[in-house]
Image (cartoon, rainbow, N blue to C red):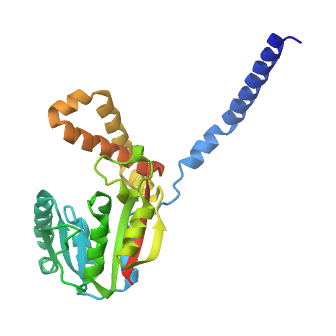
Amino acid sequence: MTETQDSTDLERTASESLMQSYDAWEQVEDQVNEILDQSLNPRGYDMLYDLVAELGLPAGARALDVGCGRGPHAIHLAESFQMKVLGIDPVPYAIEAARKKLIERAGSNPGLAELVQFEVGWAEALPAEDGSVDLIWCRDVLELVPDLKAAYQEFHRVLKPDGWALVYQMFASDPELRPPDVQAENVEPEYAEAAMKAAGLQIEKCIEVGSEFGEYAQEQTGIAGRMLMHAARLLRAPDRYIEQFGKDNYDIALGDAYWHVYRLLGKINYRIYLLRAS
């Protein structure tokens, strides 16, 4: 048998194997897709509030929402648990939006205005006295903080001896998966956990979220699919959007779009930490 014949036989065998694979797939494709259309019942963000409920903190407990954004979490903590919540964020626009939201919600819940406050502040310099806080709530913020070690030292400083910190944070060891505005060290689990321990915080619980919250968000709102389309448009016509909004805003929009898609695929990992002062 010649070398040409050997090559031809190998190609024929490979082709037959491929056709057998496709034949097998054709027989189950509809069934596979039908099963994959069924939800795995992912947990959503309410899981974070469930963890707070399990702590059994009394009404009137003091909470800090570090990186509060426009205030929804601080308001929800006050409404659900009757906590006194101070929300801080370094972005003045976000604080103004949070105060407006509080005024709106207080219209139907007058006592809310006595429980919640918002002010500009930083994780590395928390506006609270030593040992005065029952709960620190910090959701999807610490990847952005310039000095993570200082932030965790502040957590330890302001927490009561029996206080808790609930931290929900993104991790992405692959540099290509990191949004452009994150601090590279902060999204390395080993670095983050070392910073917690060095500050005197004990990890009581660590929950790997994986793709669950991304799946939940997609099933409820379709957000990942929408953001995938945004990414496609941003990549296909960058000049159009840069001219309208500027390069910085273009980069943020593209990074945000990638973030939603990567989260759904589990390419970036999220963890929930429950921390206590040790």
Q: Which quarter shows the C terminus? A: bottom left
Look at 39% across and 77% down and name the residue there: 275
Quarter location, residue 166: bottom left
Residue at the far right in the pictured view: 1
Front residue of 209/131: it is: 131
In this image, 266 relative to 235: left or right? right
- Quadrant (top left/top right/bottom left/bottom right) for the N terminus: top right
Viewer-closest of 1 and 239? 1
| 241 with respect to 197 (left or right) | left
Residue found 27% across the figure and 27% down from its top: 237
**Residue 123 sits in which quadrant?**
bottom left
Left or right placement of residue 66 versus residue 101 in this view: right
Where residue 106 sits: x, y (%)? 13, 73
Which quarter of the picture shows residue 132?
bottom left
Position in image of residue 32 (x %, y %): 62, 44
Residue 212 seen in the figure: yes
Q: Residue furthest front?
A: 198
Q: Nearer the viewer, residue 101 or 170?
A: 170
Place of residue 254 in the rendered image (x, y in percent of width and height, measured from the top left)? 30, 40
Q: Is residue 47 visible?
A: no
Residue at 42%, 68% in the rendered image: 193
> Relative to residue 148, is residue 131 depicted above or below?
below
**Residue for point 20% across, 66% down:** 71
Q: Is residue 146 above or below residue 260?
A: below
The mark total stands at: 0
User: Vertical placement of 1 versus 108: above or below?
Assistant: above
